[in-house]
Amino acid sequence: MWAMGLPGMDPNVYVCFTDCKIPQSESTESRITNVTPNCGMCIVGIVCQDKRAKTESMKKMLSTASRELNCKAGPFGSTRVRNVLKDFCFEGNISDVDDEVTKVLLLGCGDLRNTFQATTSNNPKKELHPPNLEIHLNDLSPSVLARSIIILKIVSAHDFNPDNDEDFGFLWDVWYNVDWPEETRKRFLSIVKELTNEQLPDNVSIPNKSHLEKLKSLWSNWHSVSSKNKTDSESLLRKVWGQRNGSSRRQNNDQPVCVNPTLLNPYTHHWKIFCLNPFDGYLPMEKGELITSVEQIMTHSCSEILKRLVSSYRSRIPTVKIVFHLEEALKHCYSDANKFDVIDCSDFLDHVGLANLVVACCRKLSDNPNAVFYTEIMTDSQHSANTIVETSLCASLSMIPTIYGLRLADHVELRDSAVDYLRCNTLQRGRPVILCWQKVPNFQNIKLVPSPDLDQCVTKLAKFCHQTTFPKPASLKSSAGSDIYYTPLTFNYILDSMIKRLGHDFWLPDIRLLEIPHQFSLARKILEDWKNGKKMMKFTAGVQYIRKSAVSQDSTPLLRLVFVRKASYMLKGDLSGPDVHYIDNFELEFKHSSKGIKVETSFLLTSDDHGFFDETYTAIVIDAFDGMPLLLLESFKLMRVEEYLELYPIDQSKSQLPLDPKEQMYMKVESCIESEEQYTLRIAIECDGNVSGLKISTNEQAPCESCHDVTVSLTQPSKIQPLSLTFPFPILAKNVQATLHRKSRHVDLLLKKSLLEPWPCEFHSKNSKWIIDDLVPWENVPLTPENGFNTLEHHLTSQLISKNINSDHFLDSKCSALDKLRLKLGVLMLRDIEFVSYGRNDDRYLLKLHRPLLTSPMGNPILPITALNDILSRILGQDFTTNPTVLKEGMDHLKIYKEVFPIGRSKDKLVVDAETEEEFQLFRFLLRLNSTRIEPSKWQKENIPLGGSSPWLATFLSPLYQDSLSTESIEDEPADEKCCAVCKKIPEKLKRCSRCRSAVYCSVECQHSHWPTHKHICKKL
């Protein structure tokens, strides 16, 4: 056969696509038996049975196939427990009805510590009635879920007492210890026998029967291992002792008699934990948690923490329901109908790509305005959280609400999340950052049309989701470069979700003009046919050959299915020709038999496409990184064909734009052009006669200066109804520009986005805030006895982690406004001053600094401040000299002003000038943002007017930690020298940007429309 000529292809070699080595002396059958799949939204790989999974439906194939680097699963967590409900606002979600339920989803849940921690949360409004919780636990590993249900069975028993040494010792043995005494073995056998008979805890359910059967099979396996006779148990003990070291036993005087089967590979009974100990999951410890008065300090300290979590859960069992789902996380998001108030993916470490995760989780969020979900990204020295988010989502922060229907509650533009991993800047590996996401209001009565910025986002998405070649990730510890997991289906899901949310696709550019490589033409046709309800066929092919060198400790293949003509590929090995077709969304399925495992590949085609692939074509699975063939599939005529009945995951019914009103007179939006900085609307007035009396109103609520809703109304014609508009990104209420064109009967409306102003939901949030009067003073002690470098200086230095930061850096004209602000924050926090004037020209803030510094709940130093917007003070002063009606208000203001800022204390005053308008706006943003996070002190409540339109703020300052050496956000694409940067036309004469000479345009109009995007890179050249 021709395939025998492919270099490195051997029909007799079966290998594991992992770094674990199979001894050459083992038989072929043994090696086949050790091969099993790991499919995760088609992060499909061939891996050892330590991570056993079976592919099920095409819906799970959202991401490009990939193999796991490590085949050893972790049965217990290695990171500190997090309370996913800590910041959740129960108000508005918990009603007066006692059975109101808060629903929580933990994707890739891991062990039960986060579940137990969630039960410590209470609704502050109903302390006597803790909220009813329904916690859904999802994980791909059967061992993780099976262990969790065993532990719930143990702690839910009526006679279980966490304070009893025997009871808690049994729990600790099952959770962490690899060898057990006889008493633990007996109790464990009783537990798993009941579970095998489906005697689950009363508050636990497994809705999918196939999932339950898999878990029952595993419990039976563990029961069998624990029931071995003395000789076999001792033999297995010796085998395991030879593979691991260390112990976390609470009583060392107990003689071990058997192995903990839940920590072993269920098929080989090998020790499967790699470089993991139970203490990692409890570090760093808080003050008072470390018990030093006993031996085995860490074991007892961690035991006490776990004991508190278990006790909390036991006290809440009547109000907590737990539901288990054994399937890949993203597949669960697209197949399960439940909606959730809180979703946590922060422990879901499998690389699926941020865009895939965000789109999947958004559809699972409930309509509760307080609903949130959490993701985790890994930054490194070259990629900040801001850069990773914008690059991974192919959109700037101000465009994310439109494209994804979400807002990032963490202000990564200020490195707001960096404090979560302060003091990690010495680590060479990636740094985790937890990001919080919330839904935004949908567009209302808006017809969005194509715009340069929106087109740029779609173009970048198309490029990321249709890559013919992939650069290998520079670091597996960073979330940068996660676009390698994007596929054509990722592109479809993002755009189709946006179409459904907006109710139309007028904004969508012509897909044919996006320059998608021709290799994806078949993949795009398949997805469009599937979406449009065309009959789909599932093709299943066996694997004829596996490449010998598919296994390598130095490489991580990224799997891709390719259809190519045999002749051209044999002669040239070329995958760029017109007859090459890439399929990134496919399945690998593994069928077990007495002879080993049969590998099959499945993919979708329409009935029309099937006849196109005759015997001149072949199908291979390649490594997308280098194009090398890994698997050769059987011929098309031998493939098994069946009808595929699964529907496209995203409902195609649109919430259409409102139809033209039946009235003869009305207003409607003809077009809305969105850019990163503004919305530009043209509103048609459908009527006869004169139009006049244009009025624009908003739903602005002071002290917030931004809003989502705008109402357009006219006094003439008198019967015309106002037009209400809603925008996902808030706009500046006082910067609305509207022009009424009477002759053409239309309104031009320009709305500036509030890029440097807290969102309305932040000003009016009912979430718990820091109570300033309850915070303890900052302990400014030396870091080490050897030097005078104290903890405050350490935090302020951590604002800048660049290696070459010195005084010259801040004098450099290229120094960013954020870095200059960081320097001045350090001055304000270090110097012993009480009064500061900070601003630019006549626009200034007067600050009263309330020392001493305090320690925030996050552990960083904060400086409480009373701030007065001085320009508003002067305006008010002018008013009460010319308008007698506000005389009393003006005099009261002047009295407060003199009391807070007494004259004649020049030694305690400092004047700080912002060098640029951008720096001052950042400072103003920081003051206003921080004011939304605290409850003012008693002194501030009694001495200054707060809230409403008052110019006074109770706020604070704290360090702004830099999270990478690179501080730039998403970059503009390099300009094509031959075509216009906006419309991509190639005219005879191109006009260059006179400032940087790099970007080219065909007209002045194109240059003007591109400026909001281009100016960011134009400054740097």
Image: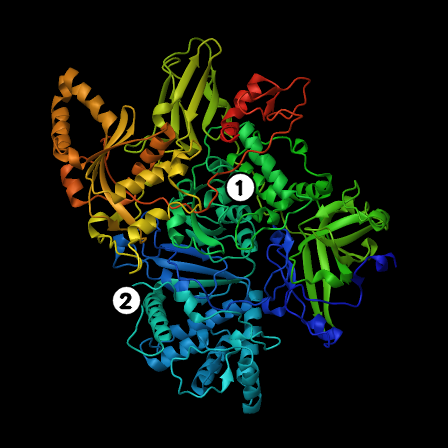
Please, what secondary structure does the residue beneath circle 2 have? loop
Task: Look at mark 2 in the image and give the residue it sits on.
Answer: 288
Q: Between 682 and 666, which is closer to the camera in this rendering? A: 682
Quarter of the picture containing the N terminus is bottom right
Q: Between 489 and 20, which is closer to the camera in this rendering? A: 20
Asked if residue 539 is positioned above or below residue 736 in the image, the reply reads: below
* Rendered location of residue 856, percent (x, y): 28, 51
Which amino acid type is marked by label 2? Gly
- 958 relative to 65 in the view: left or right: left
* Rendered location of residue 316, percent (x, y): 33, 65
Asked if residue 1010 is positioned above or below residue 303 in the image, the reply reads: above
Q: Residues within 10 Å of mark 2 (few under 14, many from 20)?
A: few
2 and 1 marks in contact (CB < 8 Å):
no
* Rendered location of residue 938, percent (x, y): 16, 45
- The picture quadrant where one finds residue 133 is bottom left
Q: Between 806 and 609, which is closer to the camera in this rendering? A: 806
Asked if residue 810 is positioned above or below residue 290 in the image, the reply reads: above
Which amino acid type is marked by label 1? Thr
Q: Residue at x 35, y 47 (%)?
A: 797
| Residue 932 in view in this figure | no
- 405 relative to 315 in the view: left or right: right
Task: Look at mark 1 in the image and give the residue it sits on.
Answer: 391
Cα–Cα gap, marks 2 and 1: 42 Å
Q: Residues within 10 Å of mark 1 (few under 14, many from 20)?
A: many
* Rendered location of residue 445, percent (x, y): 47, 28
Say which label, 2 or 1, has the lower sequence index: 2
